[in-house]
Image (cartoon, grey):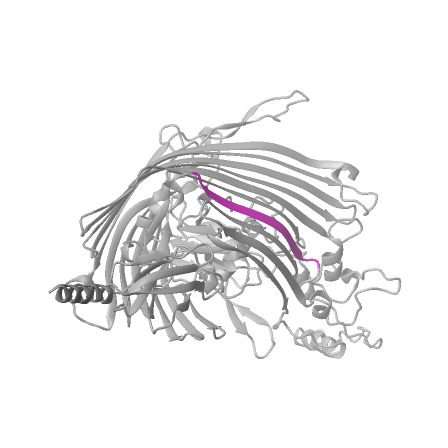
Amino acid sequence: MKFNSNLILFVVLLACISTYAQKKITGTVIDKQTNQPMAGVNIVSSNSKTGTISGFDGKFQLELPDNVASIELSYIGYQNKKVAIDGSTNYNVYMSSGQDLKEVVVIGYGTVSKKDISSSVSSIKTKDLPQGTSSSFENSLQGQTAGVNISSSSATPGSAVSVNIRGVSSISASSQPLYIIDGVPMVSRNNSALNANIQPTNPLADLNPSDIESFSVLKDAAAAAIYGSRGANGVILITTKRGKTGVSSVDVNYYTAISEITNYPKMVDSEKFKSFFNTAAEFDGLGKDYFDWIDTSKGVNTNIYDEIFRLGVAQNLDLSLKGGNEKTSYYLSGNYFNQDGIQIGQGFRRLSGRLNIDHTISDQFKVGSTVFVTRSNHQRTIGENDEYGVVINAQGWDPTEPIYDDKGKYTNPFSYNTWWPLENPVQIANEYKNTSQSTRAQGSTYLEWKIIPDLKFKTALSLDYSNLVESSYVPSGTNKSKTGEGIYATYEETNWLVENTLNYTKKFGEKHDFGAILGWTLQGNESLFSDQSGVGYATNSTASISAASTITSSTSGKNQYGLQSFFGRANYVYNDKYIASFTVRADGSSRFGENNRYGYFPSGSLAWRVNKEEFFNIKTISDFKIRASYGLTGNQEISSNWRGTYSLNANYNGVPGIAPSRLGNPDLGWETTTQLDLGLDLGLFKNRVNLTFDYFDKQTDDLLLQSKVSGLTGFNSVFQNVGAIENKGFEFAINGAVIDGEQFKWNTGVNLTLLDNKIKKLNNDGEEIGRNHILKEGEAVSTLYLIKFLGVDPQTGDAKFDDVNKDGIIDFSDRQIVGGAIPTYYGGWTNNLSISALH
């Protein structure tokens, strides 16, 4: 009997051992793109509750029951990975970042899961962009997302780039989007004093593109209304790189790029040049040998384009260090960029550094800071857009004459046979000086307090300081100035911001997800500027204003404005298929009249994930979302022009005096844009193919425009809220992973935007803007007003123009609307191919 009891006990113990038999596995999680270990990755067994997290070095170990066939790994922003347990004891697991529905997208004052977005937001990661060679990041975004039109009017290094999101919504105020870098609004307007007929500088070129991690483009009102009075033109959120827990990594990146002009007019040689003039003279009745006195015997055939164009070379060096542990993470970078333009006399250099650091004090408190400094030097040529421009003068060059005479001095086109050139273009590029030096420092710091697990308070202080120093000089003895002209200008701007936000997120049960944010911000801006010019220089060895014999002008000034804002947003998701978001913001700005200082900007959006319904059973469709949004945004990008101002230099008969210089308008208020957006998102084949379609209708009212007033006031005009602009259109985008292998990937995307922009209402309908543009109801904002070219008379070779008033004379009275500068459609096609080595 005793034997039988022992036998039974042995059998029971054997069964227990068999039931609880365990196997131990180890491994390392590695980022497939960077080949760096990944810390904090969740690792769970497929059919049990066993799990762990990878350590700082990416390593993990896990004890699994014998019956477990696989493990699953997940990390925010990366594709989930399933690994079969095949009997090995050690596994190297490579994880790839992916555009799946669990991806977190940066929105205003927070983040949200991609699947829970109910507004029109495009998220772009810089690793998915082609390697750019431009001084500024905007060019890399060109063609990447629907609704965003990016253009540049010049190949000048460091020159301004125009970015419009869903059309142009303003005439006098800015139509450029608001740029937010790590929560800090960046001053992006051109503060250059040397803007007359010259390419403007680009303040955004101060930012090193290699420091950027991702972009979020907020296009509709529901997404941008959280920024209220500054969101009418859309918002571009820029997130810079930060450190991650794990092994520190050092990245060094260097490239050299060359650029060359490929298409320019072909120059004739001296004999053809002479023949052309004789032919023209013959048609004009002057005789076929009228220009035989042009001397071509010297054998000179100067191709002026070979003299002013060159091989442009850009050099870029990036050095970065990032890493961290469970308490502190950091990212430190430095950048040197140097670009010589394809035209002589043009160049851009930048030296910058950045430090991003985050530190977890405890489970409740976290702090972080960002410091960014840069120094840029910009060399431009004056008169790029007028008759003293380098290229414009080259177009009329006489090929029978050299660039330099026998004494090595620049030749003077006015002494030659042709009538067009006003200056030797090589002399303009080399001797006419125009330099800008920009210094920028941006810093921010934050404190985050987790009051309770679902409630966080965050306070942040940021500062953006920029200083621009410019110098321009036209040498004495030139055609433009016999005695020399000099300009010296400075612009110093300080922008500070204090933000306080309270963020609450909570999941109730299995079906209810709720989030809310409340915020209060204060912003102040102060700018100091000066501008001096002088003429009469005894020597060209200095451009200093103090060397001028006569100071022709000297001005200085100061501008200030402030902005106080209150905002709130609530998000709700029911059962992962019904999504709602509502936002309201109140902005009070000193830029507007005392009677109309506060503006209120509400918005709302709804979305329905149809594929989550029980009745929906189409396996090829992995995501099907219908979106709708409506809201208001504003525009305040003018100076304090509502104020009545006085001139302090109204001198009379040698006695100093003060006189009114601008009429005030205490009722001046915001430009307001109302926008409706209807959208559709479709994911196919487990989201390997994604389609997005949007219809938008933007109505901008109360334009900030100069409007005529009675002469009895003593003034001609005053800033008022008058006029309206409409932007309507469609956006379509399709992106697909054509090949998604372990070693080779091919992603492609196509987007198209159709846009209809027109002015609906104006007080001064038909107002001419300069020589070439007109403001006209029913037409686009940037409508060209020109003399219409009808072609060439085949009998005489003379140009023919439309004589609108039929008076037999072609002059400015024959101008007419001939088109517009705003494209009615635009798009892009991108292809990204990547090859990974076998592991």
At horizontal 73% and vertical 72% (from top left) the residue drawn is 303
| Rendered location of residue 69, percent (x, y) | 28, 70
Q: Is residue 141 visible?
A: yes
Residue 50 on image: x %, y %: 28, 59
Q: Quadrant of residue 21?
A: bottom left
Name the residue at 63% across, 69% down: 261
Q: Is residue 290 above or below residue 702?
A: below
Whether residue 193 is visible to the viewer of this picture, yes or no, is no
Quadrant of res 796: bottom right
Image x and y of residue 205, in percent: 56, 52
Q: Residue 612, located in which quarter of the rendered image?
A: bottom left
Side of 407 where 742 appears, left or right: left
Q: Residue furthest right?
A: 407
What residue is drawn where x is 66% and y is 65%?
312
Seen in the picture, residue 221 relative to 268 is either above or below; the reply is above
Residue range in magenta is 345-361
